[in-house]
Image (spheres, helix red, strand yellow):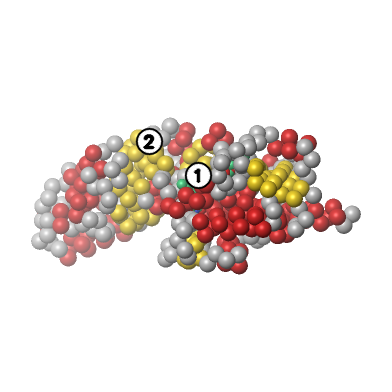
Amino acid sequence: MNTAIIGGGAAGYFCAANLAEMCPDMQITIYEQSRRPLRKVELSGGGRCNCTNTFAAISNLNQAYPRGARLMSRLFHTFGPQDTCRWFEQHGVPLTTEPDGCIFPAAQDSHAITGCLMQIAHRHNIRLITNHRIDNPTQLLSQGFDHVVVTTGGQPRMGVPSLFTLRIDDDRLHKLMGIVVPHVIMTIPGTKHRADGPLLITHWGLSGPATLRLSSYAARHLAEQNYKSPLIINWTGTTNTDDASRTLSTLIQQNPGRHISNLHPFGLQTNMWTYLTDKAGIPNQPAANISQRTMNRMVNLLTNDRYDIAGRSPYRDEFVTCGGIPLTDINPNTLESRLTPNTYYAGEVLDIDGITGGFNLQAAWTTGYCVAHAITQKNKSRNSK
Ligand SMILES: Cc1cc2nc3c(=O)[nH]c(=O)nc-3n(C[C@H](O)[C@H](O)[C@H](O)COP(=O)(O)OP(=O)(O)OC[C@H]3O[C@@H](n4cnc5c(N)ncnc54)[C@H](O)[C@@H]3O)c2cc1C
């Protein structure tokens, strides 16, 4: 029996390694279009490779996978994040977990992961053919391969980018570059797209976890709008305007002699708060003199601050494509194509993508493993006939 894998990336290598361990007699060939396999894994997580996540902060898989959550939930029964940790540790790669749930190799070096996968491939005599692009998977079936696994990664022509930062043309905002606001809620008005978390102001707009999450949730919508869209930022971190208003009133009552510029509510740094009050034209007066009207303006400013998105730029640490092979075209148990038997799909080539934090590589490991498992099962049932 022999299997061809098209694409020597995370999903391709993980599938090959597991297939080799599950079916020692299987002959496996990886076709890689570039000179160097596993390049993206090498670069991942800024060279440290955020290889998975504890999922502790994820109450619903839709939060981690804006597209493909249902399939991921099903596949996690076969190979989930804990299996990933166990797998790498058992294959000689100790891991470490950061407070935010992101998991990295303890060596803090992506080569720990790529080296492990390459060693397994070498040990099992997996053939690697580099500089070899395959455009038609069925061609390999007709050349005598029993199974073909397509793991060609994100295909820009089949989808749109996800995980990007937002350009906001506002010179005064750019001057606040480097400021992190610990908890904001970002919304695209007129849609259900909303994300919360820390926000980072950059020299050209907005970044940080909340922005990247929003870019992932709204990837298709923003592409349709040509990355021009209104955006609302709630700087208080609470959607309850009454709560925000109460917090502000208490702050004012407790500090009647302080000027507005010295209040900086909701943990907002002085420069940030001054930028906001200037933007709303709120005069800098002692807190005791603030009228109800000014108070309402402040609450509105803090909970409903409007911007115009003027474009996007890729996030330097992670960049994925939203889109790919429609999940309706594959068998959700085996990831085998419903249209072309004996052809399987794994990794980012599928219409599955996650937010930042190790979720995308987890999808590559899970789908790669599940394909290896499905091919093994098929082989066993063939052999027993
Ligand atoms: C800079 C960067 C940093 C990232 N950091 C993280 C991170 O820390 N954590 C995380 O979870 N995710 C991260 N990601 C996302 C993650 O790397 C991808 O989701 C993951 O690599 C997808 O794995 P894959 O095997 O599906 O595709 P890829 O890793 O992209 O591999 C696909 C391979 O197929 C080859 N190929 C394509 N077409 C053909 C063809 N026709 N014939 C032959 N070969 C072909 C490509 O050359 C490539 O080697 C990052 C992405 C980038 C770009």
User: Which quadrant of the structure image shows residue 343?
Assistant: top right
Q: Nearer the viewer, residue 63 or 315?
A: 315
Residue denoted by label 1? 320
The residue carrying pointer 1 sits among few (fewer than 14), some (14 to 19) or many (20 or more) residues within 10 Å by Cα, namely: many
Mark toward the start of the polypeptide (1 vs 2): 2
Q: How far across and how far down the image is residue 303, in percent?
A: 31, 50
Residue denoted by label 2? 311
Amino acid at dot 2? Gly
Q: Is residue 167 left or right of residue 349?
A: left
Residue lying at 30% horizontally and 54% vertically, measured from the top left:
180
As displayed, is residue 257 above or below residue 177? below
Q: Is residue 263 left or right of residue 79?
A: left
Asked if the beta carbon under badge 1 is closer than 8 A to the nearest atom of ligand 1, the reply is: yes
As displayed, is residue 94 above or below residue 159? below
Is residue 107 visible to the viewer in this orientation of the structure? yes
Amino acid at dot 1? Val
Query: Closer to us: mark 1 or mark 2?
Result: 1
> Are the residues at dot 1 and dot 2 in contact (C-beta closer than 8 Å)?
no
User: Which quadrant of the structure image shows residue 351?
Assistant: top right
Q: Secondary structure at mark 2?
A: strand
Q: Secondary structure at mark 1?
A: strand
Residue lying at 76% horizontally and 48% vertically, measured from the top left:
2
Q: Nearer the viewer, residue 255 or 269?
A: 269
Q: How far across and how far down the image is residue 96, in percent?
A: 48, 66
As displayed, is residue 280 above or below residue 45? above
Residue lying at 43% horizontally and 32% vertically, measured from the top left:
226
